Image: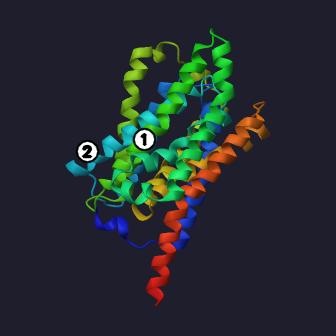
Amino acid sequence: MPAHLNRKASPVMVILAFAIVYVVWGSTYFFIQKALAGFPPFILGAFRFLAAGVLLITWCAIKGEKLFDKKSIKHAVIGGVLMLGVGNGLVIWVEQFTPSGLVAILVSSAAMWFVILDKPKWKENLKSTSTVAGLIIGFIGVILLFAEQMMQTMNNTENGNQLLGIILLLLAPIGWAAGSLYSKYNSDNKVSVSVSTSWQMLAAGLAFIPGVLITAEFKHFDRHNVSIDAWLSVGYLILFGSILAFSAYVWLLTVRPATQVSTYAYVNPVVAVLLSILFTSERVTFIQIIGLIVILGSVLLINLAKYRKENRVKKTATY
């Protein structure tokens, strides 16, 4: 593992980065849905990530940072396509016909996939009773979250989009967790976190273009008909959701354990649901709230062993 993954980070910076990822990313579900009122999904994804990538890499160039390293770019492209192209891309597409609060809840299973896919940590994670219990309880929570929508879909054979949405929202967290772990274990010191983030967003933006061409979105898209509200939402997604929050997330992966960073998946739905309730007509059912609470409990169990180990190390170091 690269040495810089173990480097010391300022506790204040870590707390600030977590706060940004928790709150800002929780709000992006709401703003994605508002942006979709004016932009087709693939155009939205391409424009958002290409704009964010160009802005960030331009800033890195102005600062004189090293931009081109073949190996680093390759790793950034793979991680970016998995995280933003697959993980976030599926979320954008599904939000066309699924409430943003519900989408945020359904993708909260990402934290479990971090444990399942983190092969270098299997021995450490899976021998822990609390981690295994957390995975089982989290799976039960995900079933509760999907139960009502699954029943409605099964009873309504004409609602094919909802069934497809459920399948895609099962795949999205897998793509995100896989990309995050790939980025964590394949990062190096040859380029900065900002440069790596830039290449990830540029790669993701390009990954949306085949979707634009296949669906012929440009034929039905007129930028003059896009409302100010949709433009402002895209601006928020570019500046805050991508440049600020995604940069904070990539940095956290280099200084904190992946299972700890993955807890964003359990906090984001709370923010998303609150925004949905306050500013839209969306409603979350009681059983979905129970499912979310169960999953929140699972993440505490998943991370319990990690916290205990860190505390033991700290206590040992003081003696």
Residue that numbered label 1 is attached to: 83
**Of the pair 27 and 90, the residue shown nearer to us:** 90
Q: By what rule are the colours in the image chosen?
A: rainbow
**Amino acid type, residue under disc 1 in the picture:** Met
Where is residue 130? Give x, y as percent: 54, 58
**Of the pair 93 and 311, the residue shown nearer to us:** 311
Sort mark 2 into few (<14), some (14-19) or many (20+) by Cα contacts within 10 Å. Answer: some
- State the mark number for residue 74: 2
- State the mark number for residue 264: none
Q: What residue is rendered at 49% in x and 30% in y?
A: 90
First in sequence: mark 1 vs mark 2: 2
Where is residue 2? Give x, y as percent: 28, 63
Horizontal relation, residue 90 to residue 138: left or right: left
Residue 281: image quadrant is top right
Horizontal relation, residue 286 to residue 131: left or right: right
Is residue 267 at least partly visible in the picture? no
**The N terminus, quarter of image:** bottom left
Classify 278 as above or below 190. Answer: above
Classify 9 as above or below 221. Answer: below
Q: What residue is rendered at 40% in x and 15% in y?
A: 214
Horizontal relation, residue 281 to residue 250: left or right: right
Q: What residue is rendered at 56% in x and 59% in y?
A: 18
Residue 194: image quadrant is bottom left
Where is residue 307? Give x, y as percent: 53, 67
Task: Give the foreground label among 1 and 2.
Answer: 1
Q: What residue is rendered at 25% in x and 44% in y?
A: 74
